[in-house]
Structure formats: C-alpha cells, structure tokens
Image (cartoon, rainbow, N blue to C red):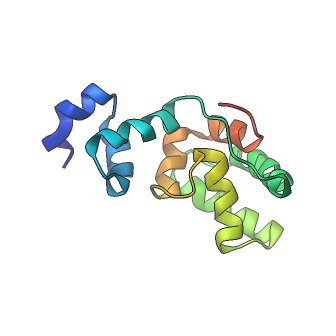
Amino acid sequence: PFAHAEERLAALGVDEALWLAVRGNLDRLEDAAMWRDVVQGELTPVIAEEDRDFTAAAAVKALDVSADAEGWAALTSALKSETGRKGKGLFMPLRLALTGQKHGPEMPSIFALIGKEKAAARLRGETA
C-alpha cells in the first residue's frame, strides 16, 4: 500500500496516483522513479517510420478525448474503427510513442497521468 512506502516514495517524487498505476510493474520501489520521469519529464517518442501516419492521427484524436482512463478507451476505439488496427498493431505504436517502452503499466492509467496535451505532442513525434 502507498501508506507503507509513502516516505520513500515522496523522496523519489512519486505520488499516490503514480504509485497505484506503476506498482505492479516494478522490481524495486526505486524503479518508480523511471515511470515518474516517463510521466512528468520530457521523453523522445519511439515511432517506427511505418507508424508515423497512425500516430499522427492518434495525436489529433487524443486532443478530443478526456484525459482519463475513459479517454484512452475512446481514443483506441476510434483508432480501431478508423484504421482497422487491433491488438499489438494498435497498442504497441501508441505505447512506444507515449512511454518509449515496450512493456509497462496499463496504458489507461499512464495516459491519464501523462495528460492529453503531452500525449498528443509525443504522438506527433515531439519530445515532450
């Protein structure tokens, strides 16, 4: 629970919302700092050349959804309908652009923590 590690997490700059989102993907408590940087810091997105049009379309749509878990669901649903992508072909380019990582916490929570403006910038390929 957050309360058990609150002092150590505070020293890492990790709040309860981030802790709840990432704790299942950590080997050590200190690894939460990496996800703090992904969420709060600047990140250069990883976008394959063949995914540039897809992530650019996702950037536009990201600004039209709510900045929460429901917004992530709306974003991916709209992209699935418009592009026909599904599964890994739908989610992996978004995850890489938003986090720079192939694996990690559930994207609805991470999307909400990143915020839709920063998410849109990363999906456009901008360091944000």
Left or right of 73 on screen, residue 123: right
Question: Where is residue 13 shown, x and y percent of the image?
Answer: 34, 28
Q: Name the residue nearer the viewer: 7 or 112.
A: 7
Q: Which residue lies furthest to the left in this view?
A: 4
Left or right of 62 on screen, residue 106: left
Res 70 → quadrant: bottom right
Residue 93 visible in image: yes
Left or right of 2 on screen, residue 53: right
Which residue: 18% across, 40% down? Answer: 5
Which residue: 73% across, 69% down? Answer: 80
Q: Which residue lies furthest to the front in this view?
A: 27
The vertical placement of 64 against 128, above or below, is below
Q: How many marks?
A: 0
Left or right of 26 on screen, residue 105: right
Question: Where is residue 125 shown, x and y percent of the image?
Answer: 76, 39
The vertical placement of 122 against 65, above or below, is above
